[in-house]
Image (spheres, helix red, strand yellow):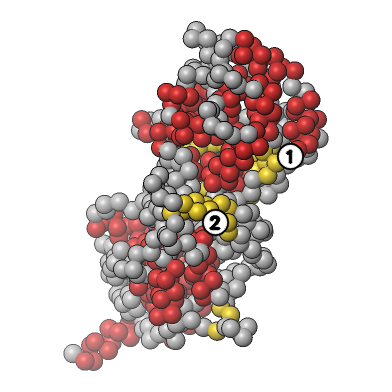
Amino acid sequence: MYMTHIVCALFHHTVQTITITTFFTVMTIGVPSIFVNDDEQPVKQIPDIKFVVPEGEGHDDLGGLFRTTNDKEEINDNLLNLFIDDNDHVQVHKLISQVKKNGIRPFTDVRLLDLMNRLSIDPNGLFILSEIGVRKMVSVSEFKTAAKAAGCCEFLNLVLSSSLTIPDWQSFITEIKKMYVSLKDAKGGKNAQYIPQLARVNPNYWGISICTIDGQRFSIGDTEIPFCIQSCSKALNYAINVAEMGPNEVHKYLGKEPSGVGFNQIGLDKNNLPHNPMINPGAISCVSTIKKGKDFSLADKFDYVTNEYKRMAGGEFIGFSNATFLSEKSEADRNFAIGYYLKEHGVFPQNTNLHETLDLYFQLCSVEATADSASVIAATLANGGVCPMTNDPCITADAVRNTLSLMFSCGMYDYSGEWSFEVGLPAKSGVAGSIFIVVPEVMGICVWSPPLDELGNSYRGILFAKKLIEKFSFHQFDCVQGGVQKLDPRRKIRHETKEMQISNMLSAASGNDMVLLTRYHETGVDFNLADYDNRTALHLSVCSGHLDIVRFLTDKGKVNINCLDRWNSTPLDDAYKYEVHDIIRFLEKRGAKKGETLLLAATVQY
């Protein structure tokens, strides 16, 4: 996992606040050759992000805020060679295409922004502009110098070698696309009716966004439309509180147990405390402890919490719907009744202003996110509280552990037990139709579809989660089910025998798996290795007609272009046999021969 050095403000440092706003204008057009970028989202203005850094520390660019440059780090030559032409120039469009193919958004990911700017790469990643606006080529040395200065060599090595959380990103998102399409026309449930603004939202909205702990991103559907996070705020408020005050202090005012009753029921546990922070009584009590004992006004508390939300979202979209706030407040008799009940039983901290507490509770429920930005929040929880996009340590690891435990047992209203049994992942749903799903140490997911089932959870969201677990081994207890055949997208190259390596390499060449071959190349595997018939990866890629693989093996893999199998056939013989004319032309241009020609020459020489 890519982890950079964290620049933190220690308590004894003098700190200063800086605000950075970055703008991009991007045209979405196709990228040739190795990748079709069909999941790219239109890039919008990135909102202001406030970071606190020690005075005197370097922060000349956004990418340097949470990491330091390793001057000894270099781009791996084997990887960079994949994108170098015959004139020793970096083919920037191919390199950027490979970055996107592996799930990284180079023009919004702060880890690569500095490199993009230093090289003046156009927003579509097709070419580099000179100072006078003319296209230019960049040499290998220029690229290496820029990458080193930008401090992104280590990250680029991981990206280009497909060594991120999900190595075969394209295969993974292909399955996610299938799930999305299969549920697009699913009919069931209806929008929340008790808040007029939620009732009016288009019920056909449907989106899925994913962010891994390495910052691999995928979004499909209605993922840029703001929605109110509603009860998803309960999990975040609890995490923020525990990170600041510690669990012992927070749990003086609320419990940890599933309630067994409705989320808005009036009642307390055996200790005269709300059962947990994921239902209304516990969430209201949790809000009452925000900045407890500090001289913070209601406005200050709102700014504090929403700024923490923004940090967890990596500075991506966080908004506010005043209309929803006013609507929710006007329909809040039940929540006021809960508040007075809690006050009567002495649940709140001393001198708590009930009306301000409820106002803050309604306001935080009315905070807006998009599925795209919410997936980063979920990924921050999956990554132990460190935002994967900025490496900002937003929430302590202990607070994340406690939060995920309660999301697992209590996060899905009256469906929580069934969810834990069937899906087996920490999650929190909201009545606006969103579900934040956390796959610990892997990824965060946000699904959004406004129609709710009878228990108040997104109808499509529940169906998606079930399909996800049917396909992938993400259930927390899949590890103990040896007989269950599921895909594990996290699986990487492990210790292989020579025979396994040859088998996997030949399968990759035949199956057009550039990802695996690239990873083998980065680790120095000999592509001339052959099976028992003396057939090599080049033989099989020719037979399957994969010109890109043939080019890779000959130009980058340095294979013997005239290798003979047990029948004395060369790759060129196979190309003629299967009539792959583009490969015939390619091989002959590079001096390939037929087997009989080689044998005849050897005989004459003898």
Q: How far from the left and from the top, in percent, is residue 330?
A: 79, 25
Residue at 65% from the left image edge and 28% from the top image edge: 361
Residue at 46% from the left image edge and 52% from the top image edge: 15
The image quarter in which residue 30 lies: bottom right
Residue at 42% from the left image edge and 84% from the top image edge: 88
Q: How far from the left and from the top, in percent, is residue 220?
A: 64, 49
In the structure shown, which secondary structural element does the residue marked by tag 2 occupy? strand
**For the residue marked with disc 2, what is the amino acid?**
Ile
Residue closer to the observer: 566 or 125: 125
Q: How far from the left and from the top, in percent, is residue 405?
A: 45, 27
C-alpha span from label 2 to label 1: 26 Å
**For the residue marked with disc 1, what is the amino acid?**
Ser
Q: Which mark is residue 321?
A: 1
* Crowd class of label 2 (few under 14; some 14 to 19; many from 20; radius 10 Å): few
In the structure shown, which secondary structural element does the residue marked by tag 1 occupy? loop
> Outermost residue toward the top?
270
Q: Earlier in the sequence, mark 2 or mark 1?
A: 2
